[in-house]
Image: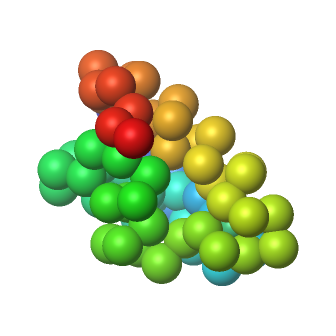
Amino acid sequence: MTDEERLKARLRPGCICRGVRLYRLIEAIEGGAGSFAEVAARTGIGGGSCGGKRCGAKVALLLAQYGREQQR
Ligand code: FES
């Protein structure tokens, strides 16, 4: 991930329902989180009005970008 992408991730929403920025999701995954549940435990995402649908899709995409299968 480039520095510019990291900077943009600081401005982009990761979980709109919980007000968590995208870079927090990235930090969690880079820190070893390998599933939505693990990212949620580290960042507080999920459980909002969308039921984790929107942020769940972002986590799945990020995990794929980092070469990890989403663990169930
Ligand atoms: S966007 Fe994360 S719970 Fe809705």
Farthest residue, direction front? 72
Report the front residue among 54 and 21.
54
Image quadrant of residue 66? top left
Percent position of residue 70, x then y: 39, 33
Relative to 17, 67 lies left or right: left
Report if residue 2 is visible in the image.
no
Report the front residue among 16 and 47.
47
Residue at 28% over, 44% down: 34
Relative to 32, 46 lies left or right: right
Image quadrant of residue 17? bottom right
Residue at 34% over, 37% down: 71
Q: What kind of colouring is applied to the model shown? A: rainbow
Report if residue 42 is visible in the image.
yes
Report the front residue among 12 and 53.
53
Residue at 60% over, 48% down: 56
Percent position of residue 11, x then y: 61, 61
Farthest residue, direction right? 49
Percent position of residue 55, x then y: 64, 54
Percent position of residue 42, x then y: 32, 72
Relative to 27, 25 lies left or right: right
Give the vertical position of 16 relative to 9 (above or below). below
Relative to 43, 19 lies left or right: right
Give the vertical position of 6 relative to 43 (above or below). above
Q: For the C terminus, give its image quadrant.
A: top left
